Amino acid sequence: PELVSCVVVNDFVGLGYGTLTLDNSSGEVERLAGDREVMEGGVICCVGAGTGLGECFLTCDAGGAYTCHPSEGGHKDYAARNATEAGLKNYIVRKYDPAGNRCSIERVASGTGIVDVYLYLAGEDPQEVDPTIDQAIKTAGSLQGKVIGTAAKENACALCVKTMDIFAGAYGAEVGNAAVQYIPRGGLYVC
């Protein structure tokens, strides 16, 4: 067969359209919304942390067809909620935007953000650094966030646990913000 046309889309646009193929009743999707029913034709929203923080939303037309809209929602401002997070925000601003005063949420709630959170905490509390895990992080290349997450999951490194707590708090807050922003009665997918 000959390829007639091809459309290149944003990764989260592809993911958003993919949500339309999920079988919500099969156990393929884990429901976290309690007993509230999904509204047919309602707005759908997707938020997912990877190398950055991706977001998209889908709207339904009168004929029932959805259109997925890309978003740069991961570039919204990061809102620090305590003194540690305020210090983290200042650290990230100094590192990435020294001429400005801006820290986007994806600088914390993403795979690369996990590394920056760890580096900040390690600088603030050097006695908490586990030398073996720190060396593994330094040599992991693009998998540094995975090393931190695994060490936290195994409870092998208190600093990694603190890192993942901050990451999860920021990620959860952004998912909540997306719910308020988009009012996704058709579903909110955390990918």
Image (tube, rainbow, N blue to C red):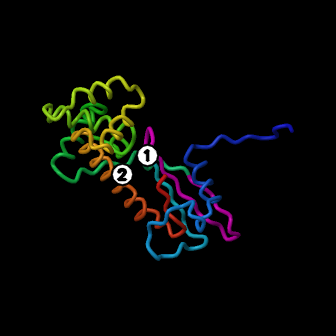
- Which residue does the numbered mark 2 point to in the structure image? 171
Q: Nearer the viewer, residue 53 or 159?
A: 159
Badge number at residue 49: 1
59 magenta-colored: yes
In the displayed structure, does residue 87 sit left or right of residue 190?
left
Q: Quadrant of residue 108?
A: top left
Q: Is residue 30 above or below residue 96?
A: below
Q: Is residue 167 above or below residue 179?
A: above
User: Picture coordinates of residue 138 (x, y %)?
Assistant: 32, 25
For disc 1, the neighbor class at 10 Å (few under 14, some 14 to 19, many from 20) is many
Estimate the spatial distance between the alpha carbons at disc 1 and disc 2, rounded to whole Å.
8 Å
Of all residues shown, which one is farthest toward the right?
1
Q: Residue at x 52, y 75 (%)?
A: 37
Q: Which residues are magenta?
A: 49-69
Kind of residue sitting beneath label 1: Ala
Q: Are marks 1 and 2 in contact (CB under 8 Å)?
A: yes
